[in-house]
Image (cartoon, rainbow, N blue to C red):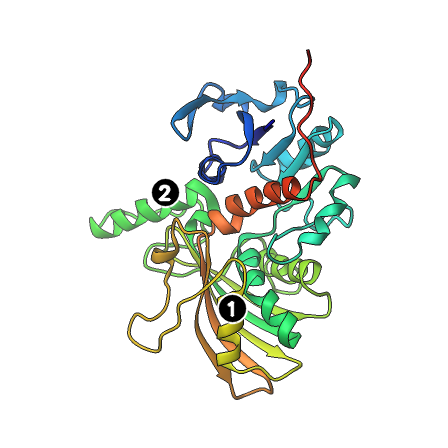
Amino acid sequence: MGFKVAVVGATGNVGREMLNILEERGFPIDEIVALASRRSQGTEVSFGDRTLKVKALDTYDFSDTDICIMSAGGNVSKEWSPKIGKQGCVVIDNSSAFRYDQDVPLIVPEVNPDAISGFARKNIIANPNCSTAQMVVALKPLHDAATIKRVVVATYQSVSGAGKEGMDELFTQTRAVFVADQVENKKFTKRIAFNVIPHIDVFLDDGFTKEEWKMVAETKKMLDPKIKLTATCVRVPVFIGHSEAVNVEFEKPITADEAREILREAPGCQVIDKREDGGYITPVESAGEDATYISRIREDSTVDNGLSMWIVSDNLRKGAALNAVQIAELLVERGLIQPKKKAA
């Protein structure tokens, strides 16, 4: 028997990708339901060869639903995830609403699968921030091998991380530049076309942004609370795919060749690292792919036991939709969830 699965936020970029990935990976589904706000009720979305009509979240009964994959933003999740969980439906939440709740596991299946058993406290599992997810996939096997002390990361994050509005703004501004129209900023604080913006999410009192703080807090929660991390998060004029320049300092010696071999064997990782023109991955090549790609692995002679690397991944997939589906798969694989019996 398969599961009844609901996707909340089914009309958004990530929600649509979640439906695609559930179908692509053959998740055991008996029934799939697409949900969104009332204004999207009746909108059609695709699930494989089928077309689903979107239903309204606020009138839907979750009592016979097994898994709810939530991608409707933090405010919606704060209101609805606890209610859904209390109806016996496991919520996999893509927002930041519950990531830092000690009673809610924050999961990347390749990194900390054992932590998933804690979901029963609230029937909620959190999906990490997109920029953190791809980074910890690459860092976990290296941490196991040589113990990470400190990480310095600069991100190059695509506009799809800011949703459809972000993608539309890059397209509109790029066209405006070419035809000499006025360039308007609506979604971003400065022009994104042919520019980079060192500002994602709100500023905090210490001068870091909340996006940068998320990378610190989430890495500590999922990987190791002892790791020191500092981040600079930058929005770049790329439609899909986040890139990161990551510098890592280890407690134990590790060479670039050793790191390369470790990462080649690590789940979710793909090493593309030739020291020649084009011997690395860029966001364009990562789009539509599941892997976290690691390139430019090299030793940093300015510190003891230091490595630098380039990490790229499709933020809509591993950074969001794919990871959520992998969490659902982990629940099933470990026998932590059973389909609810249908009424006779």
Label 1: how many residues lie within 10 Å, few (<14), some (14-19) or many (20+)? Answer: many
Can you name the residue that lies furthest to the front here? 1
Q: Are marks 1 and 2 in contact (CB under 8 Å)?
A: no
The residue indicated by pointer 1 is 263
On residue 211, which mark appears?
none
Q: Secondary structure at mark 2?
A: helix
Front: mark 1 or 2:
1
- State the quadrant of the C terminus: top right
Compared to residue 201, the image places residue 30 above or below, namely above
Residue found 66% across the figure and 65% down from its top: 206
On residue 168, which mark appears?
2
Report whether residue 199 is seen: yes
Compared to residue 135, the image places residue 127 above or below, namely above
Q: Amino acid at mark 1?
A: Leu
- On the picture, is 176 further left or further right than 337? left
Q: Could you say where residue 316 lies in the image, as x and y percent from the top left?
A: 47, 47
Q: Quadrant of residue 219?
A: bottom right
- State the quadrant of the N terminus: top right
- On the picture, is 289 further left or further right than 231? left
Pick whichever, 198 or 155, lies toward us: 155
Q: Quadrant of residue 295?
A: bottom left
Label 2: how many residues lie within 10 Å, few (<14), some (14-19) or many (20+)? Answer: some
Residue found 56% across the figure and 60% down from its top: 137
Pick whichever, 10 or 206, lies toward us: 10
Residue found 32% across the figure and 59% down from its top: 194
Q: CA distance from mark 1 to mark 2?
A: 36 Å
Q: Could you say where residue 332 lies in the image, as x and y percent from the top left?
A: 64, 39
Q: Could you say where residue 234 lies in the image, as x and y percent from the top left?
A: 47, 61
* Mark positioned earlier in the residue sequence (1 or 2): 2
Q: How many marks?
A: 2
Report whether residue 104 is seen: no
Q: Amino acid at mark 2?
A: Asp
